[in-house]
């Protein structure tokens, strides 16, 4: 079913801003691979406009062109006309959401429900603990010899990280402010170490930290995968939860969540959404800002560390050098930027699961560079990129640790209760 007439006019007006200049083409990862105009931003804009004008029907080929977009939004950063490509893409996927196969829609719905519901995430975490305790991972890898697609499933499920640092007591010193930390839904399921790492560093900086109640997710994946109505409900519930929290700042751990929260005022027209976005920062920017005011001591790390800048880091408008600034606090660290650092790694949204060939192909240059170096770490502040890199490196048996930059900082921190 197509959108209402008002929504049609709104989207058509947004597409009118595109002058088809083509300046976005060199920055589009899918166009760079396919050289297909329908796989470019202006091509997709034309398709969405035709859908809203009812000049085209959502055919399987058209649906594929929209689905294969990684939503990296690199095109928006270079567009001289400031076209709201994110809004246009979301509208196109909203129309075509029911045109996929039943199997695809069932798998996508199951994944989105799992990520969006706290109770289901807790159940999945328990199942993952059993999965690793019974060494089912080994059985899956053996079966992958006969069924190769199972290897992707096995490598995308990382072991829960064993924390190598302790969280200092919040009562050790009088805290400056109360900070609420937002963990990504995927990080929650996979017991990612970013949350305890952030608590360690921020408490050392004399902040009181609380874990933002993950009753509902931020809605980012729903927003970008053809279900904006559910996304809006999740945003409203997320904002309502924030209303009851006595905190001075809201800090997100994943740049995907950060990008979504920064868009809240345009997605939900309410004073609360604007207030929430106004007091929000990503963990790297927040930590760098306060490390400049209060120095901490870190153990030397004389190893090479590759720094990956995810597309969502550029979307949130923060300094693209923020991760390097953060990790320069560690003595003797050898930071290296990836040669292909401005390109999308291919993990965008659910593409790492549903557009696997594109995802692997787009991330290949990064993986090849890392594997053929003496790097010990690959750091990225995006959980989707991290899972994608871990899976590819695991399939190559590469001994490179992929982690969030705040985790590396916490592991090198020299903490003193009386500092």
Image (cartoon, rainbow, N blue to C red):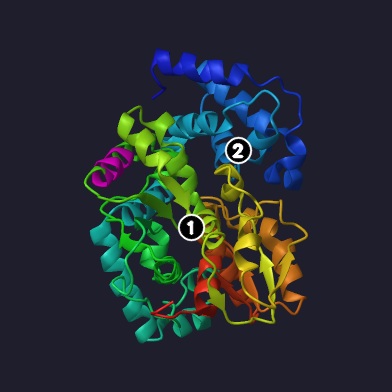
- Where does the C terminus fall, quadrant-wise? bottom left
Vertical order, 346 against 31 (above or below): below
- 239 part of magenta stretch: yes
Between 292 and 299, the one lying in front of the other is 292
The answer to whether one can see residue 208 in this image is yes
- Where does the N terminus fall, quadrant-wise? top left
> Residue at point 38% right, 55% down?
111
Magenta stretch? Answer: 234-242
- Local packing at callout 1 (Cα closer than 10 Å; few below 14, some 14-19, many 20+) is many
- 330 part of magenta stretch: no
Which mark's residue is nearer the viewer, 2 or 1?
1
On residue 65, the disc is 2
Q: Secondary structure at mark 2?
A: helix
Question: What x and y, as percent, mark residue 311?
Answer: 61, 49
Work out whether mark 2 precedes mark 1 in sequence or the reverse, and give the earlier one. 2
Vertical order, 295 against 164 (above or below): above
Label 2 and label 1: CA atoms lie apart by: 34 Å
Residue 3 located left or right of residue 308: left
Identify the residue under disc 1.
Answer: 283
Residue 80 located left or right of residue 390: right
On residue 250, the disc is none
> Residue at point 54% right, 79% down?
412
């Amino acid at each position: 079913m197509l959108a209402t007439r008002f929504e049609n006019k709104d989207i058509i007006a947004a597409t009118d801003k595109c002058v088809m200049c083509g300046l976005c083409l060199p920055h589009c990862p899918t166009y760079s691979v396919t050289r297909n105009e329908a796989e470019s931003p202006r091509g997709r804009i034309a398709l969405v406009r035709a859908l809203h004008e009812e000049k085209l029907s959502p055919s399987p080929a058209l649906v594929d062109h929209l689905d294969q977009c990684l939503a990296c939004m690199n095109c928006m950063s270079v567009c001289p006309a400031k076209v709201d490509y994110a809004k246009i893409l979301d509208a196109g996927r909203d129309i075509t959401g029911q045109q996929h196969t039943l199997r695809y829609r069932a798998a996508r719905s199951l994944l989105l429900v799992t990520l969006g519901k706290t109770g289901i995430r807790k159940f999945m975490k328990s199942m993952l603990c059993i999965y690793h305790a019974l060494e089912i991972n080994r059985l899956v890898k053996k079966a992958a010899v006969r069924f190769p697609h199972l290897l992707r499933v096995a490598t995308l499920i990382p072991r829960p990280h064993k924390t190598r640092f302790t969280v200092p007591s919040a009562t050790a010193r009088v805290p400056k402010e109360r900070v609420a930390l937002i963990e990504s839904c995927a990080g929650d399921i996979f017991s990612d170490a970013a949350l305890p790492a952030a608590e360690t560093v921020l408490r050392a900086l004399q902040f009181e930290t609380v874990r933002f109640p993950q009753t509902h997710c931020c809605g980012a994946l729903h927003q970008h995968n053809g279900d904006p109505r559910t996304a809006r409900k999740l945003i409203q519930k997320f904002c309502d939860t924030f209303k009851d929290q006595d905190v001075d700042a809201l800090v997100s751990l994943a740049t995907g969540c950060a990008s979504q929260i920064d868009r809240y005022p345009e997605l939900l027209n309410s004073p609360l959404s604007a207030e929430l976005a106004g007091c929000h920062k990503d963990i790297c920017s927040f930590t760098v800002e306060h490390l400049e005011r209060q120095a901490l001591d870190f153990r030397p790390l004389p190893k090479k560390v590759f720094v990956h800048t995810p597309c969502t880091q550029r979307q949130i408008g923060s300094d693209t050098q923020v991760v390097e600034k953060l990790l320069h606090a560690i003595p003797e660290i050898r930071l290296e930027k990836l040669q292909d650092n401005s390109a999308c790694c291919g993990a965008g949204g659910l593409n790492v699961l549903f557009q696997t060939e594109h995802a692997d192909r787009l991330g290949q240059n990064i993986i090849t560079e890392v594997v053929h170096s003496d790097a010990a770490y690959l750091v990225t502040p995006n959980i989707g990129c991290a899972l994608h890199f871990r899976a590819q490196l695991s399939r190559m048996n590469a001994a490179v640790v992929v982690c969030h930059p705040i985790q590396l900082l916490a592991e090198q921190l020299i903490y003193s209760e009386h500092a």
